[in-house]
Image: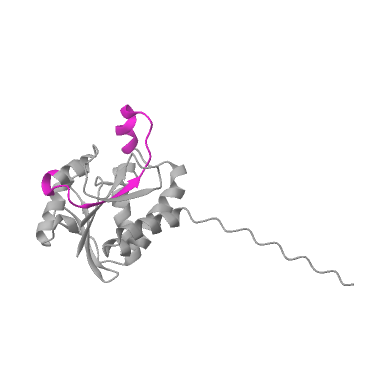
């Protein structure tokens, strides 16, 4: 069993904010794979089902970003899972917009949701870092992440969420590198090779 946690803030006013891309990712997974209905429990919205033959639990904490670890800890305890079975989807300023990075463990990098999870369950879990880009000025970060995605972002955002949802069976099966490479390929497909020129017809004597 795998626990997939999307980080974000609850409430309609936060739905389209950059900080909520983790919520958006697990919602895209839920839609594509037809999992069970969302239910309010364990200080979050929870949905269960199977993906690629693997039992999964999706969790959107309702504890707000800064206290995400409380809901994650409750879910791990309830389903009797170790932290290594948890995959956290979150926004990442230091990854270019529309790209992802997948890693196990590490620091929180100043991300308040990860900081809370580290405090409650430790750092030994998987992270899917969903790139939202950086505003370029450290003082602008708070306003940037709590602002809605721009209309110009919709193209790469939709393609990113679709690719993550489509390729997630590899992720829950433990094929993290394959998941990352297939998402990257979906977002940046190789350019088609130009057709070879037709051979010249031989002249008849």
Figure check: 54 above or below 160: below
- The quarter of the rendered structure image containing the N terminus is bottom left
Residue 153, horizontal then vertical, whole percent: 44, 44
Figure check: 55 above or below 101: below
Visible residue check, residue 55: yes
Taking depth in this image into account, of 45 and 189 the one nearest to the observer is: 189
The part of the image, by quadrant, that contains residue 171 is bottom left
Q: Is residue 80 left or right of residue 46?
A: left
Count of labels in the image: 0
Q: Is residue 116 left or right of residue 139?
A: left
Q: Which residue is drawn at the image coordinates 85% and 69% (left, top)?
A: 203
Taking depth in this image into account, of 195 and 153 the one nearest to the observer is: 195
The part of the image, by quadrant, that contains residue 76 is bottom left
Q: Which residue is drawn at the image coordinates 41% and 54% (left, top)?
A: 184
Figure check: 64 above or below 199: above
Residue lying at the far front in this picture: please name it: 205
Residue 132, horizontal then vertical, whole percent: 37, 42
Q: Which residue is drawn at the image coordinates 30% and 69% (left, top)?
A: 52
Residue 23, horizontal then vertical, whole percent: 28, 51
Q: Is residue 117 left or right of residue 19?
A: left
Taking depth in this image into account, of 118 and 16 the one nearest to the observer is: 118
Identify the image's colour scheme: rainbow, by chain, secondary structure or one colour: one colour
The part of the image, by quadrant, that contains residue 19 is top left
- The quarter of the rendered structure image containing the C terminus is bottom right
Residue 120 belongs to magenta span: yes
Q: Which residues are magenta?
A: 119-145
Residue 44 belongs to magenta span: no
Q: Which residue is drawn at the image coordinates 31% and 56% (left, top)?
A: 27
Visible residue check, residue 30: no
Residue 174, horizontal then vertical, whole percent: 26, 62
């Amino acid at each position: 069993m795998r626990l997939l946690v999307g980080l974000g803030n609850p409430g309609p006013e936060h739905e389209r904010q950059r900080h909520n891309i983790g919520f958006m990712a697990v919602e895209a997974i839920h839609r594509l794979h037809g999992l069970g209905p969302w239910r309010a429990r364990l200080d979050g919205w929870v949905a269960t089902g199977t993906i690629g033959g693997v039992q999964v639990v999706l969790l959107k904490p309702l504890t707000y970003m800064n206290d995400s670890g409380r809901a994650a800890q409750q879910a791990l305890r309830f389903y009797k899972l170790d932290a290594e079975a948890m995959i956290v989807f979150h926004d990442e300023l230091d990854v270019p917009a529309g790209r992802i990075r997948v890693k196990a463990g590490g620091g929180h990098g100043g991300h308040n949701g990860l900081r809370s999870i580290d405090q409650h369950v430790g750092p030994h879990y998987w992270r899917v870092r969903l790139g939202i880009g950086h505003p370029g000025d450290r003082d602008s970060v708070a306003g940037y992440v709590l602002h809605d995605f721009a209309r110009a972002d919709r193209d790469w955002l939709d393609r990113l969420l679709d690719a993550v949802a489509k390729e997630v069976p590899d992720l829950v099966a433990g094929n993290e590198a394959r998941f990352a490479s297939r998402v990257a390929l979906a977002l940046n497909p190789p350019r088609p090779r130009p057709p070879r020129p037709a051979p010249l017809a031989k002249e008849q004597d």
